[in-house]
Amino acid sequence: MNETVALDVRHLQVVLGEHVIVRDLSLAFPVGRVTAVMGPNGAGKSTLLRVLAGLLAPTAGEVLLGRRPLAAYGRRELARRLAILPQRPQVPADMTVARLVACGRYPYGSLLHRDKAADRRAVAAALALTGMTDFAERQVASLSGGESQRAWLALALAQEPELLLLDEPTTYLDMAHQLQVMEIIRRVNHERGTTIIMVLHNLQQAARYADNLAILSDAELQAWGPPADVLTPTLLARVFGVRAEYFHTDGGRQALLPVGLLEES
């Protein structure tokens, strides 16, 4: 595997019950880049993310991290290299933000045998990067949706992973908080060099924040590449069943926006 590849997916297949969720998928996620995984509901995006995180074993094929299959890693070893933030994480009602973020240091040893100074530095850096320092002693249950998402993101960053997997990180957030979270994700990528793979539904977020898009539909990879090459009216019609047109902003930026369903034309 090339050293510029973060995760190497080879002939991956995932079957759940009688349903083929992913069929013969081969894809190399580049180091230090942001990849958005997109597709219709039920396309297998979240399932793929779970496989990439080592939480679900594929039916066939393999995922390599650092020339080794994910299955060859121990739980702590893998968590030192890779972190995942699911859609709806759960937390005890009385847990503070600081305690939550400190849980991200689990991979680095037991409570009796660990570098506590390194833990404190990692937690402080994660809180600062997500703008959650002033919320450290607040209970997570008292936070707004955007604040809560930033707290969970800080937990993942406290792991200091090489790869960060995010499952719809802006779901249930208003527009301002969506942009806030996406800007943090971009900072994590730029300042830490973290490879990021995230499931997204918002076309404009994907076009603005991702280096590459992986489009899934019908259990297969339909397109891969930079947003400008992948997001076209033809692809949106074929994969999502919508009509789309190009628009230009006052600043000269080109945007592709859905304008209707194909069945309406």
Image: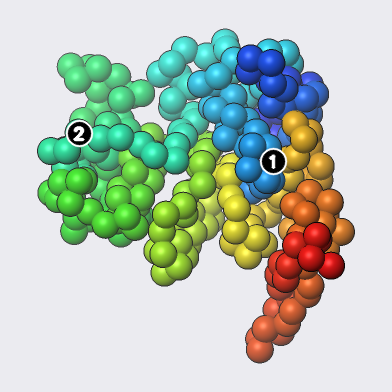
Q: Is residue 121 shown left or right of residue 202?
A: left
Marks 1 and 2 sit apart, C-alpha to C-alpha, by 36 Å
Q: Are marks 1 and 2 in contact (CB under 8 Å)?
A: no
**Residue 139, image x and y in percent?**
15, 46
Q: Is residue 185 shown left or right of residue 69?
A: left
Q: Is residue 233 visible?
A: yes
Foreground: 155 or 91?
91
Residue at the spot of label 1: 30
User: Which label number is shown at residue 82?
Assistant: none
Residue at the spot of label 2: 92
Q: How many marks?
A: 2
212 to 265, vertically: above or below: above
**Residue 148, image x and y in percent?**
30, 50
Residue at coordinates 55% horizontally, 19% vertically from top-left? 56
Residue at coordinates 77% horizontally, 25% vertically from top-left? 23
In this rendering, which labeled residue sits more in front, label 1 or label 2?
2
171 to 14, vertically: above or below: below
State the image quarter where residue 242 is shown.
bottom right
The residue type indicated by label 1 comes to Pro
Q: Residues within 10 Å of mark 2 (few under 14, many from 20)?
A: few
Q: Is residue 23 shown left or right of residue 159?
A: right
Badge 2 marks a residue whose secondary structure is loop
Q: Residue furthest bottom?
A: 250
